[in-house]
Image (spheres, rainbow, N blue to C red):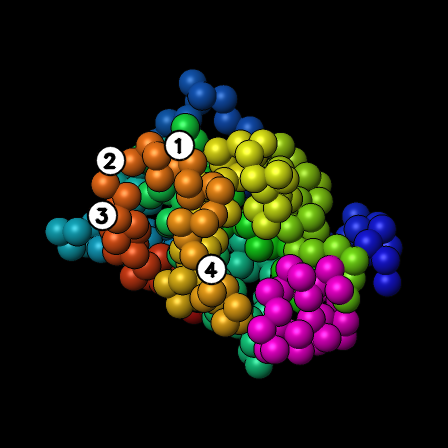
C-alpha cells in the first residue's frame, strides 16, 4: 500500500468521524460572543459533555479547595473561558475513536496524548509565543493519526506494532508499512475538520523539524512535549529513552529563553497526575 493510497483512503473514508457539533459551535463563536452564557447554552445541549465538564471542574487541577461544583455555569467559571475549548475538546475526541478493549493502545494512547497536552500548555507559558489553548489542542491531537491507522487499517497496523515491539519508533514503522506516518494522516484529518492550519501543520511536522532551524514555535513545542511525555513513562516503545534532550534543536531554541531550564522541566512533570485525571474522565463510559 503506497503513501497516496493511504491518504486517498483517509480522505474518502465514509465512517471517518466529523467534528462534534458542540465543538463546531464553540469554534464558530466570534471573540465578542465568547461568554459564559453563550458557552453554557452550547454545552448544555449535550448532556454527556455537560456531565464531564462538571466532573472536570471538580478535579484538583481546577478546584484545589474541593468545593463541590454541581452546575455547568459554575464549572465554566472555574475552568475559565481560555481553557474551555481545550476541556470540551478533550471530553469529546476520545468518544470518536473507540479503541478495542484488548488493544495495546487502550489506555496508553490517551494517557500519552493528555500528558503531552498538559506539557505543551505549560511550556507555552514560558518558552514560546504560542497561546495555551492552541498548545493544549496540538498536544492532545498530535498522534490522532495513529488511531485512524489503527482503527481503519487494523490488519496492516499489526505489522507496525510488531516493529514497535522491537524498538522501532512508531512513525518509522508506519513509514515502512504504509509509506506514510501518523503525523501526516492526522494532519489530513484535522484539515477535514476545519481546524486552523497552524494546528494541522504542527501535527504534520512534529516528528520532522525540516533542517532543524526552519520550524515555527508551535511545531517545536509539540515536538519537545512529545519527547518529554515519552521520557515521563508514556512511550510506545523503549527507543525514545535513548534521546538526549539537550541535543534536540527545538529544545536548544527554547532553553535559551528560560531563566532556569532544569527547574521548569522538573515542574513539567508535576502536571502528569492532572493529565491522567482528565484522561480518565474523558474516556469514561459511565455516562
**What residue is rendered at 69% in x and 71% in y?**
160
Left/right of residue 244 with respect to residue 9 in the rendered view: left
Q: Quadrant of the N terminus?
A: bottom right
Query: Which residue is the site of mark 4?
Result: 243
Mark-to-mark CA distance, 1 and 2: 13 Å
Determine whether label 4 and label 3 are within 8 Å by CB.
no
Determine whether label 3 and label 2 are within 8 Å by CB.
no
Mark-to-mark CA distance, 3 and 1: 17 Å
Determine whether label 3 and label 1 are within 8 Å by CB.
no
Left/right of residue 253 with respect to residue 266 in the rendered view: right
Q: Position of residue 188 (x, y in %)?
A: 71, 44
Mark-to-mark CA distance, 4 and 3: 20 Å
Q: Is residue 157 magenta?
A: yes
Residue 259 image label: 2
Residue 226 in sight in this render: yes
Q: Answer with mark 3 or mark 1, whichever residue precedes in sequence.
A: 1
| Closer mark to the observer between disc 4 and disc 3 | 4
Query: Which residue is the site of mark 3?
Result: 263
Left/right of residue 169 with respect to residue 129 in the rendered view: right
| Closer mark to the observer between disc 3 and disc 1 | 3
Under circle 3, the secondary element is helix
Give the vertical position of 274 relative to 11 (above or below): below
Classed neighbour count for the residue bearing mark 4: other residues with Cα under 10 Å, few (<14), some (14–19), many (≥20): few
Q: Answer with mark 4 or mark 3, whichever residue precedes in sequence.
A: 4
Q: Answer with mark 1 or mark 4, whichever residue precedes in sequence.
A: 1
Magenta stretch?
A: 151-176
Mark-to-mark CA distance, 3 and 2: 9 Å
Amino acid at each position: 500500500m503506497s503513501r497516496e493510497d493511504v491518504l486517498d483512503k483517509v480522505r474518502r473514508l465514509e465512517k471517518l468521524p466529523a467534528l462534534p457539533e458542540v465543538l463546531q459551535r464553540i469554534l464558530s463563536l466570534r471573540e465578542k460572543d465568547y461568554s459564559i452564557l453563550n458557552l453554557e447554552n452550547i454545552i448544555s445541549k449535550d448532556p454527556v459533555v455537560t456531565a464531564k465538564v462538571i466532573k472536570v471542574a471538580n478535579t484538583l487541577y481546577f478546584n484545589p479547595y474541593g468545593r463541590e461544583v454541581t452546575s455547568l455555569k459554575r464549572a465554566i467559571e472555574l475552568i475559565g473561558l481560555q481553557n474551555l475549548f481545550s476541556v470540551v475538546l478533550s471530553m469529546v475526541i476520545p468518544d470518536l475513536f473507540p479503541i478495542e478493549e484488548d488493544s495495546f493502545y487502550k489506555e496508553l494512547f490517551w494517557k500519552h496524548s493528555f500528558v503531552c497536552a498538559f506539557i505543551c500548555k505549560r511550556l507555552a507559558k514560558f518558552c514560546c509565543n504560542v497561546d495555551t489553548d492552541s498548545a493544549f489542542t496540538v498536544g492532545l491531537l498530535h498522534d490522532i493519526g495513529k488511531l485512524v491507522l489503527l482503527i481503519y487499517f487494523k490488519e496492516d497496523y499489526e505489522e507496525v506494532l510488531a516493529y514497535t515491539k522491537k524498538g522501532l519508533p512508531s512513525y518509522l514503522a508506519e513509514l515502512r508499512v504504509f509509506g506514510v506516518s501518523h503525523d501526516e494522516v492526522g494532519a489530513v484529518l484535522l484539515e477535514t475538520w476545519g481546524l486552523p492550519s497552524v494546528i494541522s501543520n504542527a501535527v504534520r511536522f512534529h516528528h520532522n523539524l525540516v533542517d532543524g532551524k526552519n520550524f515555527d514555535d508551535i511545531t517545536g513545542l509539540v515536538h519537545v512535549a512529545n519527547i518529554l511525555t515519552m521520557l515521563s513513562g508514556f512511550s510506545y516503545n523503549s527507543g525514545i529513552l535513548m534521546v538526549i534532550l539537550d541535543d534536540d534543536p527545538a529544545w536548544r531554541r527554547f532553553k535559551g529563553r528560560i531563566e532556569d531550564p532544569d527547574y521548569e522541566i522538573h515542574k513539567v512533570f508535576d502536571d502528569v497526575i492532572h493529565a491522567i485525571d482528565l484522561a480518565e474522565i474523558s474516556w469514561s463510559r459511565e455516562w
